[in-house]
Each structure stands twice: as structure tokens, then as C-alpha cells.
Amino acid sequence: MGNMIVICQKEMKSYFSSPVAYLLMTMFAVIFGFFFWNVVGYFVFMGMQQQMGGRSFPMNLNEQVIRPLLSNVSVIGLFLIPLITMRLFAEEKRSGTIELLLTSPISDVQILLGKWLAAILMYGAMLLVAGLNFIFLFAYGQPDWRPMLVAFLGLMLQAAGLLAIGTFISTLTKNQIIAGATTFGVCLLLWIMEWVSGYETATWAKVLAYLSIVSHFESFAKGVLDSKDIIFYLSVIFFGLFLTARSLESLRWRA
Amino acid sequence: MIKVDGLSKRYARTVAVDNISFEVQKGQIVGFLGPNGAGKTTTMRVLTCFMPATSGTASVAGFDVLEHPMEVKRRIGYLPETPPLYPDMEVREYLHFVGQLKGIPKAELARRVAEVSERCSVADVSNKLIAKLSKGYKQRVGLAQAIIHNPDVLILDEPTSGLDPKQRVETLELIKSLKGDHTIILSTHVLSEIEATCQDVIIISKGKVVATDTMDNLTHRLKGSEAVAIEVEGRNGAELATADVQRKLEQVSGVSRVINKAEGARLRFEVESLQGRVVRAEVARAVVESGWNLTELAPVSVSLEEVFLQLTESKK
């Protein structure tokens, strides 16, 4: 446990002592801010139109602002996650510091959990900056915070799974760019895989749709805690971390 | 302290280390010598639990590297060929991190970091970014990193590679000063470094141990016989027959071999003595008594390099 925190601290320092963390947070804040501005603007426009028309439909911040926004975040995340994980092991392999880690009295699992945890915290920091926008919703409206919390939990779970996969991919190469590009490709595939279910109903299409990581976020976005989707994300996390552990082990054999 | 028995390591197609065995006693400083690609790094990586061996066993302080890697890792300080440094960390921060990794208790950590910084003379740069350090400083930070948890065994893989001569000497002095506290294995392909620092030497070539001996024995074995280069000419420009001179020289007692090294008209020979005999004076007297001029007489040093080459070449 202690060792894992040592590694995690080191990774966090490395994110925040370089421009990486600030760049990611800024990029995310700008993109999210733009989405937020758009969605809220549309919401306000619809509201005004209804008033002018004299008819009133139920307007709901949770359903019409928060839900679509956070669904977008789950997709934006796919683009930023490779940038978080690509460095984790690739850089250690390139610079040779992996030898220090692997010859220290600390287990492989502690190393990879520490790094993965740091990646999650980094993602969390990004979400936090973006989440500041929601203060405005609470200042000018009364959204329900409970479904929002569930959606954020879903985002973190989804990211944790993808970050585990990214961590694994980072152990495979010395080259950060290769690690990043591959992770990006995998993330993107895991998103678009779901699209086949739009026209195809065969079993393979169902399997692909099930494996698609974004589709499992829908229940969270609605504010529903569905054990089926939680288990899916936990499985992805376990699978990614398991592969990372195996890969580190094989690194020792091949090195 | 260190015991290696029948160790082999095969990669996909090549055999890096082939059935090597050796032992290192506590407190010794051992030179691990071999040309590049001989299997030095591989052996060290097995000892440090970085990679498992294909067959054979290795143990450090009585703990097997495969069965008790944690115990072994706690007792080993390792400096790989490229020091494992994080360029974006400051020296103190880095040593602090390594100290934590090696499991130094919190209460002692700051003290240990200060101690090793002092010992490795990096205290004056402890607030500098590692990326900004010179190569020599980086190497010393690497050494500080290896000794921070006061390990029983120190494994140093080419600690002087890429350093300028002054840094080289300083690093070797530093390593020598660590002797006594630690059992040290030091790999290099530079012989003079081994001569200057080690008591024992293990020479490996093509994955096999070709010689294990104390430094003294090895130098003796290599330098026990003496060789002298001489140049002879006839008095007042008289012509001399090479064969005559050679015969004369061979008759001197203690001479084992005379090699003709004539350069044009100049009669030059290399005279080798029998083991443990000094023949310079005898050779000189023989030449002068024959009525020839002795224009040059110089000892030819059999360098460690030559012996090393002999040892490593012959096993091809």
C-alpha cells in the first residue's frame, strides 16, 4: 500500500511539474466550456420560445443540460485518455528507469496500481475543472445533484477502465507516440463498435455492442446505478490491469 | 555473499550467459571483466532480480533470486549502465523517492539522503534538476541512489562509461571508498580500472567464465616473465649477421625466446625471459662482451590488455 502511494505520488508530481497536467486541464476546460455554453444556450433559447408561445413544456436541467453534457464528456475523454497514459511505462522503458523500479523491493502490482491510480487522479482533476461550470446551474436553477453524482461516478469508472487499457499499452513500447496512438485507436474502436447494433441484430453485433465501452455509460448518464454496467466497467478495469501485470512480467523475461 | 551456480540465460535466438559459476565473499570488491556483449549486464540483471535466468541458480546473502526476490532486492544496490534518473526531478527529490522505494523508514529518510549526497559529493547540486547535471554528476547521483539503503551488495554496471578521465578517477575513488561497507561487483571493459580498484577479477567472454583469480595472481601470471627489446649494431659500422646475434642471445642464461624484429638494416630483437628471471643485465653484458654496440634496451611490458585478449580470444 505504502509503496503504491510512493509511485502514485511520483507520477502525480511528474504530471504537475511538467506542462502536461495544465495542458490537459486547459484543453478539457475549453472544450467542455464550449459544450456547456452551447447546451445551456439552447436550453435558454427553448425556454424563451416556450414563454413567447404561451405553451409550457416541462423543462428539466438534469435531462436537457447535464445528461447530454456528461454523455459528451464520456466521448471527449476517449481523446484525452491516451495523453494521460502514454507516458506511464513507455518513458520508464526508454530512459532505463524501469530497471530501478523492477529491482526495488516493490511488487509489479504495486507499481502498476500506483501509476494507474495517478492516471485516474489526473483524469479526476480534469473533470473537477470542467465541473466548476455546473456551479452556474446550481446558482440559477435547481438541478438534482444525485443523478449528476451517479453520472460522474460512471465517467470515472469508464475512464478507469480505459486508463487501465492505456497503461497496458504503454508497457508494450518504449515510444510514447506509439503508445498514445495505439491507445487512441483502441479507445475509438471501443466507442464506434456500438454502431453496428443500429442496423444489425445478429449475435456478433450484439457482442460488439455489449463490448462497446460508451454504451454502458447511458444508464449512469440517466442517473441510474445499474449493477450490470458497474460490473462491465469493473471487468474492463480488471482485464486492463491483469494484462499490464502480465506484460510487466514478460518484460522481465524478454528485457 | 554472492553465489552463482551453473547460470544460463538464453534469449530467443542467442545464448547470453552460458553455464557460469562463481562466488564472491563478503566485503570483497570484484571486477567483472569482459568485452562488450560478453554477458556482464545479463549476469548482473539476473543477480538484481531484474530478469530470471533460464537455468541455474543465483543467491545473494543466502537468498535465492527466484524464490525470495524481495529479500534480495532489499540487500542489493544497483547502478545500471545508464543511471536510472528522472530528468524532471531535483537531486534531493529523486534520492528521496528512491529511498522511499527501497523502504527506508520515514524518520531516517532525510538523514540518509543527506548522508549519501555528502558521500557521493552531490550535496552541492541537491536542488538542481537532474536534467541540468553534467555526466559525472549524473553518475554520482546514480551511485548515491545505489547506496541509499546501505545495501550489503553493490552491483555497478560500467560505472565509468562515458566519463572523462578526471570524472573516471573520481568515480573509481568513490567506489574504492565504499569498500568494506559493501560487497561490490563492478563490471567494465577497461582493464586499468579493474587494476586500480579490484582485489579479485572474473573474466568472462561469450557468456563463459574464462578466468577467476585475484588481481595480484593475474598480473603476476601475466607479468611474471620479462621481455626486453634491444637493438644491436656492429662496432665502427661493421656488418653483423643476424643469426649470430640471435644465437648469442639465446645462449644467455634465463632467456626463453628471442624474436627477430629487424627493421631494415637495424638489428632489433625481443628477448623473453623464463618465468621469474630478470635477464636485462645478462643480455647487455653478452652483447657488449661480443664486441657489439648495444644501442637500445627497453623493457616491453606485457600489458593486462594483451593477457585479456589472449584469454578472451583463445576461447573462440
Image (tube, coloured by chain):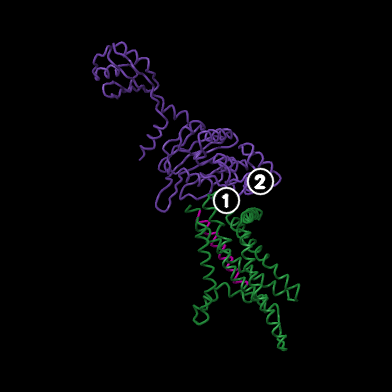
Chain colours: A green, B purple
Question: Which chain is indicated by disc 1?
Answer: A
Q: Are marks 1 and 2 in contact (CB under 8 Å)?
A: no
Residue drawn at the location 58% of the way across and 33% of the way down: B177
Which residue carries the number 1 mark?
A: A101
Residue type beneath disc 1: Leu
Residue type beneath disc 2: Ile
Residue drawn at the location 47% of the way across and 34% of the way down: B201
Question: Which chain is indicated by disc 2?
Answer: B
**Residue B140 lies in quadrant:** top right
| Depth order, front residue of B261/A243 | B261
Secondary element under disc 1, as helix, strand or loop, is helix
Q: Which of the numbered marks, if any, corresponds to residue A113?
A: none
Asked if B191 appears above or below B230 in the picture, the reply is below
Which residue carries the number 2 mark?
A: B104
Range covered by the magenta-colored residues: A230-251
**Residue B94 location in percent, x, y?**
62, 47
**Residue B152 location in percent, x, y?**
59, 40
